[in-house]
Amino acid sequence: MKTAEEHLLRRQVLNCPLRGDGMIVQMNLPFAITSLRHRSAAPGLALLLVLLVCRGAAAAPPENTDLWYTVLLQGQHAGWMHCSETTADGRITTEVQWLLSVSRAGTPVESRKSGRFVETVDGEPVSFWLMQDLGSTPREVLYEFGPSGLTRRITEAGRTSTSTLPLPQGDWQTPREASEFAHARLRGGTDQFTVTSIDVLGDIEPVTTTRELLEAETTINVRGRKVMASKWKAVTSSSPGLAATEYYDTQGVLVRSEVELGGASIVTLLSDRASAMRMGAGPEMMLKTFVRPSKPIPSRNRLKKAVYDLSVTEGDLPDLPAGGAQKIERLHEPDRIRLTIEPAASEPVEDRAEDYLKPSELITCDDEQVIELAQRAVRNVPASPQRRAEAIRTFVGRYIRRKSLGVGLASAAQIARDREGDCTEHAVLTTAMLRAAGIPARLATGLVLVDEFAGQKSIFGYHMWSQALIDGAWVDFDATQPQRFDATHIALRFTAANEDEFLSDMTALLAIMGRLKIDVVSLEY
């Protein structure tokens, strides 16, 4: 875990930990709510926000570590971040906390997350605790390191589950080691370096961050004063498509970080406690994500087939997925993709069913209440997977009673108990119940046509739904709508939502947001 070079770098420094991945993506995925009266989809916010977390160090006693950051979204104060490190009784505790507040069509959404990593002064990991509160009941995860494995305890919705896991694999550093390792290079004239560590606000799997020096000396404004800083580009293994621009002062302390994400500018600034916590309701983000098609699409419920051309206003259009009702064709014209969506048609695939039956932290298909709901939904339903999947879809649409934009991204276990949320909650619970019923399932994220919402008519809003693997083909199921699926669903990403891929899958979606164009080529009724 530690190299000789890393041991040589160990010294007492005040530091806010250099996180292994360099960024956190908060997945309040966009998406749709369902009208209680009309049960028609309406888009929610694509709140896939990157928070660049403090890292670096300054030469001062560790007991004085106390760094505060202000988070700006589109130039508006949207949250704060706090980093601390303490040393006591032979142990080093690294802690990071953040809060983010935004508005989704007038509905405030406040998200919190905390992480705490404990290690010995000799660099041996002891425990790792995470708390996540995304607008529903908090979820806590505690990892305790043993000589041959990890004990994981998850507490959520009044339930605690315990499991054992293997130790993180590969060559990685603890948060203190990673901070010291990077601190030496930030101050030592290195042009590029890489560090692999456990993310204090992420998962137990180590992530790798590579930093490249852009400018050795530049001047930046920090809290009203000019500060000499170095400028770096940071890219992480967990979100390789996103690059952050970071500024470190001469002591190696992060003073500013910037990232452009789906048309949104996110800036983290070194601040003080009072200034960082002095925030309002947060910026309105939902309405910015709507996409207006080139022409109206009438009678969506009667639409049998639709053809769309997708392009972007700037940059490159990444490859889009084919599967379920959706076929794709990359046109000769650069950065233009033609989608054909035909709900009644789906082509056979060779995907492994077992990959879409596993439980994950989001798709908790092993939760006792999720299992009980799946059994209720398919009771007295013929054994046909298609019939059972449709029964689960309609059950979820009725079961989630409070259609709300105020939930971040809840797990299926939490949704089963709270019965609240928008399209993300409908899709997550549907997918988990499908898996609990023995039907392989995954999430689809993209857009759906909305007849009217927030004063705008006939627009595409970001959305999430489910797909079930039935008779060797993916079949789409949308629990927010009265019918199974229609040809105004445009998939931008499919994901099994397992821990090792969910972040990268959702990060890829971010690259499209804010710059997508939809041209309607043909409609068949």
Image (cartoon, helix red, strand yellow):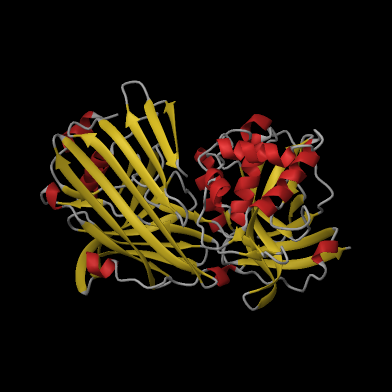
In the rendering, at what x and y percent does residue 456 appear? 66, 77
**Residue, x 84% and y 62% (percent of image)?**
303
The residue closer to the viewer here, 409 or 368, is: 368
| Residue furthest right in the image | 525
User: Above or below — where is 385 with respect to 491?
Assistant: above
From the image, which quarter does the C terminus lie in? Answer: bottom right
Tell me, yes or no, if residue 197 can be seen here: no
In the rendering, at what x and y percent does residue 64 appear? 13, 53
Tell me, yes or no, if residue 467 can be seen here: yes
**Residue, x 71% and y 62% (percent of image)?**
39
- Count the numbered circles shown: 0
Quarter holding residue 223: bottom left
Q: Answer with left or right where residue 253 lies relative to residue 524.
A: left
The residue closer to the viewer here, 476 or 266, is: 476
Quarter holding residue 247: bottom left
| Residue furthest bottom in the image | 455
| Residue furthest left in the image | 61
Quarter holding residue 152: top left
**Residue, x 20% and y 51% (percent of image)?**
57
In the rendering, at what x and y percent does residue 193 appear? 31, 44
In the rendering, at what x and y percent does residue 308 appear? 76, 62
Q: Answer with left or right where residue 150 lies relative to residue 409.
A: left
